[in-house]
């Protein structure tokens, strides 16, 4: 999910709903409603309506010390743990299973150490595929190719390359991501993005042999690991062993050899427990032992810690602020302009009260009364 387009869509849908629900015949009242909904300073969309006092898990710098190239965003706990496990900066990477929830940054948990490794190896003049990312669907692979392309556009990663091989030519051209087979055969990418069916073909076809020359993948990533069950899981397990054999990495009693296995799945982390069942499945698929600390899960806050002290006051002008009205004229009766200003102010307050009145039943602050009316029944 991209936050900015999602917020704009939500804003548009809510505005359409409110203008349809409160179909006002009076022109002045309708315009006041439009101002209330659309004004960026005094309208309804001006920030949070309620302050929840959310307490996030504090960031940590532990993961950054494990990397040579450091991204600009915050390393939260699950990311930092994954970075430490997958970094090759100070030692070999370890098997990792990321089971955090959707939208928690699972991709960055493995992608940042992968790019850091490729950057370092490329600086040493080493060519060939250095990481293989497997996705169960072409749509996921294409989406991730765009994200990786954005990272590779950074000056620090200018020498790192990536290639997308999904069988079909993607509809979109990506920055810094190769999509043509001939180009990838002539200059193998550092990061190969593909699916398991296409990887099977890449290991079989004679014309794709140049792709694997000098290949030394440090890790292989299975995204959406929960989809590889039954016969498909068996096929992928054999495919990974063929990959290790093709690049000369396999060893006795360790089918993947020096290749570090990585798996991600939000679904597998929903059941809770100690993760022993997940580790057993991962060991069968990858043929590599997974320690108890290989699982990178989500550290969730309790409801009380998450909610904290709730502030039900609307976020807007400072408390005690008053509207400034034009000074009265010499005569006692207000001018036409003053009457219009007063009417507009009362209309906005009335609409504000109407829109917020539904929340009074949930224990929030009761709505302000409209001028000229009584709150008593």
Image (cartoon, rainbow, N blue to C red):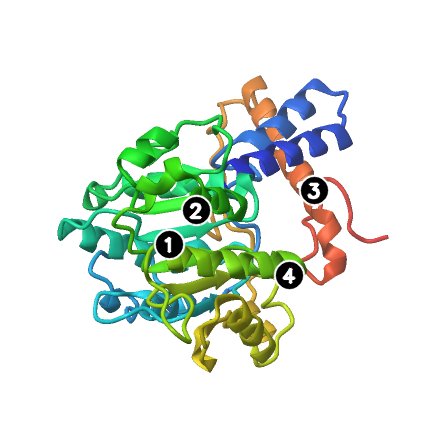
Apparent side of residue 60 relative to residue 222 in the rendered image (left or right): left
| Most distant residue in the left direction | 124
Who's the residue at 54% across and 45% down the image?
Answer: 197
Q: Which residue is labeled 1 in the image?
A: 246
Task: Count neighbours of disc 3 (C-alpha within 10 A) and say few if under 14, some if 14 to 19, many if 20 or more.
Answer: few
**What secondary structure is found at the residue carrying circle 2?**
helix
Task: Count neighbours of disc 1 (C-alpha within 10 A) and say few if under 14, some if 14 to 19, many if 20 or more.
Answer: some
**What secondary structure is found at the residue carrying circle 3?**
helix
Is disc 2 in contact with disc 1, using a CB cutoff of under 8 Å? Answer: yes
Please report whichever mark, 2 or 1, sits nearer to the chain's N-terminal start: 2
Task: Count neighbours of disc 4 (C-alpha within 10 A) and say few if under 14, some if 14 to 19, many if 20 or more.
Answer: few
Mark 4 or mark 3: which is in front?
4
Q: Which residue is labeled 2 in the image?
A: 203
- Viewer can see residue 18: yes
Is disc 4 in contact with disc 2, using a CB cutoff of under 8 Å? Answer: no
Q: What's the CA distance linking mark 4 and mark 3?
A: 50 Å
Q: Which residue is labeled 4 in the image?
A: 229
356 is higher (above) or lower (below) than 241: above
Please report whichever mark, 3 or 1, sits nearer to the chain's N-terminal start: 1
Q: Which disc is residue 355 wearing?
A: 3
Please report whichever mark, 3 or 2, sits nearer to the chain's N-terminal start: 2
Residue 91 picture quarter: bottom left
* Number of disc labels: 4
Please report whichever mark, 1 or 4, sits nearer to the chain's N-terminal start: 4
Q: What's the CA distance linking mark 4 and mark 2?
A: 22 Å
Q: What's the CA distance linking mark 2 and mark 1?
A: 7 Å
Mark 1 or mark 4: which is in front?
1
Who's the residue at 39% across and 59% down the image?
Answer: 244
């Amino acid at each position: 999910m991209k936050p900015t387009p999602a917020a704009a869509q939500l804003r548009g849908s809510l505005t359409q709903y409110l203008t349809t629900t409160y179909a006002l015949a009076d022109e002045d009242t309708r315009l006041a409603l439009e101002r209330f909904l659309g004004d960026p300073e005094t309208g309804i969309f001006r920030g949070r309506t309620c302050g929840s006092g959310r307490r996030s898990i504090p960031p940590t710098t532990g993961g950054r010390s494990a990397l040579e190239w450091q991204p600009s965003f915050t390393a939260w706990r699950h990311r930092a743990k994954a970075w430490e496990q997958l970094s090759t900066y100070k030692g070999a990477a370890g098997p990792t299973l990321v089971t955090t929830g959707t939208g928690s940054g699972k991709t960055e948990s493995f992608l940042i150490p992968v790019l850091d490794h490729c950057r370092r190896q490329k600086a040493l003049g080493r060519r060939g595929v250095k990481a293989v990312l497997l996705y169960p669907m072409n749509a996921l692979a294409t989406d991730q190719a765009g994200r990786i392309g954005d990272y590779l556009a950074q000056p620090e990663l200018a020498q790192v390359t990536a290639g997308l091989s999904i069988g079909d030519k993607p509809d979109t051209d990506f920055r810094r991501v190769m999509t043509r087979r001939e180009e990838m055969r002539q200059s193998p990418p550092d990061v190969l993005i593909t699916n398991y069916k296409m990887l099977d073909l890449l290991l079989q076809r004679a014309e794709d042999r140049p792709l694997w020359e000098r290949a030394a993948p440090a890790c292989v990533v299975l995204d959406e690991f929960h989809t590889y069950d039954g016969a498909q899981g068996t096929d992928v397990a054999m495919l990974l062993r063929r990959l290790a054999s093709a690049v000369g990495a396999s060893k006795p009693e360790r089918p993947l050899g020096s290749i570090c296995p990585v798996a991600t799945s939000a679904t597998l982390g929903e059941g809770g427990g100690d993760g022993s069942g997940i580790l057993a499945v991962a060991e069968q698929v990858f043929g590599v032992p997974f320690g108890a600390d290989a699982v990178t899960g989500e550290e969730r806050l309790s409801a009380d810690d998450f909610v904290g002290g709730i502030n039900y006051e609307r976020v807007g002008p400072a408390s005690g602020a008053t509207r400034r009205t034009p000074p009265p004229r010499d005569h006692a009766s207000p001018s036409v302009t003053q009457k219009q200003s007063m009417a507009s102010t009362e209309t906005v307050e009335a609409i504000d009260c109407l829109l917020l009145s539904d929340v009074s039943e949930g224990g929030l602050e009761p709505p302000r009364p409209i001028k000229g009316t009584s709150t008593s029944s």
